[in-house]
Image: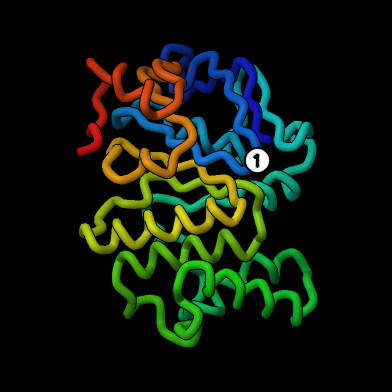
């Protein structure tokens, strides 16, 4: 469970409030779509889930423990994939990059190898471990980034605008793999302003506007309440 209570975050002066009084509970295994216009506070909010940001007011807990009390546990339980994964790669080849997180946990080599193999298989890259990342397509790089997060064996996988710069086939591939991960029990928090193709697997849609929760409902109900909110509706 990821839970925020009264979370408020400001940048710079007190008037620059990015997220205001947000309270959310995200159960294990839920597929949550977090939508909103650029600047609505989506990315700021999810960066509190594993302690990349600290709230000015309110608190955040993962599995009942305040994030600030155990950052390692929070970052193990909540895997994060950023909008530009190519900026986050730390190794030249696929398998070595995916192994980076488990290696930092000090795991045995056999356990690291198992996690890398399982993560690559989960995103359809089981036979691509020796390939150079810079020779992969954008969609394949996104899948490597997802594998890197999965190798930490998180309970929740948070993806911040994972479709930016992807063509339609790559987008469809990433969505298909997220659906498969969700079916296998991984919780997914998908941050996006574009609701095409993502509501069918979703359990819930939350929309932020000006840093506040404007909609929080099952997808079929939520799509009827999107008027005036700058998100791309599903086709």
Name the element at disc 1. Answer: loop
Q: Position of residue 4 (x, y in %)?
A: 63, 24
Give the residue drawn at x 40%, y 23%. 208
* Direction from residue 2 to residue 136 in the image, left or right: left
In the depicted structure, whether residue 231 falls above or below residue 51: above
Residue 88 visible here: yes
* Direction from residue 226 to residue 22 in the image, left or right: right
Q: Give residue 38's quadrant in the image.
A: top left
Give the residue drawn at x 39%, y 62%. 142
Q: Quadrant of the C terminus?
A: top left
Residue 86 visible here: no
**Counting other residues with Cα less than 10 Å from the Cα at mark 1, is it few (<14), some (14-19), or many (20 or more)?**
some
Given residues 228 and 175, the one toward you in this image is: 175
Q: State the scheme by which the image is colored.
A: rainbow
Q: Position of residue 103 (x, y in %)?
A: 70, 71
Q: Quadrant of the N terminus?
A: top right
Provide the residue designation for mark 1: 28
In the depicted structure, whether residue 90 falls above or below residue 9: below
In the depicted structure, whether residue 110 falls above or below residue 31: below
* Direction from residue 170 to residue 58 in the image, left or right: right
Q: Position of residue 86 (x, y in %)?
A: 39, 64
Q: Position of residue 41 (x, y in %)?
A: 41, 27
Q: Give residue 7's quadrant in the image.
A: top right
Give the number of callouts: 1
Give the residue drawn at x 54%, y 38%. 47
Given residues 56 and 112, the one toward you in this image is: 112
């Amino acid at each position: 469970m990821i839970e925020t209570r009264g979370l408020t975050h400001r940048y710079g002066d007190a008037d620059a409030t990015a997220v205001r009084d947000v309270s959310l509970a995200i159960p294990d295994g839920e597929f949550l779509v977090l939508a909103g216009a650029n600047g609505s506070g989506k990315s700021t909010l999810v960066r509190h889930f594993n302690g990349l940001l600290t709230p000015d007011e309110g608190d955040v807990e993962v599995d009942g423990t305040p994030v600030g009390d155990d950052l390692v546990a929070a970052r193990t339980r909540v895997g994060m994939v950023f909008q530009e994964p190519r900026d986050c790669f730390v190794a030249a080849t696929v398998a070595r990059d995916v192994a980076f997180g488990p290696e930092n946990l000090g795991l045995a080599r056999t356990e690291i190898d198992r996690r890398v193999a399982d993560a690559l298989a989960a995103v359809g890259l089981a036979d691509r471990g020796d390939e150079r990342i810079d020779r992969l397509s954008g969609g394949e790089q996104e899948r490597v980034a997802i594998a890197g997060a999965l190798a930490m064996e998180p309970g929740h996988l948070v993806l911040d605008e994972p479709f930016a710069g992807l063509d339609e086939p790559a987008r469809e591939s990433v969505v298909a793999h997220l659906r498969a991960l969700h079916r296998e029990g991984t919780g997914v928090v998908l941050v996006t302003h574009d609701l095409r193709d993502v509501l069918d697997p979703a359990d819930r849609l939350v929309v932020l506007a000006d840093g506040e929760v404007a909609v929080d409902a099952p997808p079929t109900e939520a799509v009827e309440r999107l008027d005036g909110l700058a998100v791309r509706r599903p086709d």
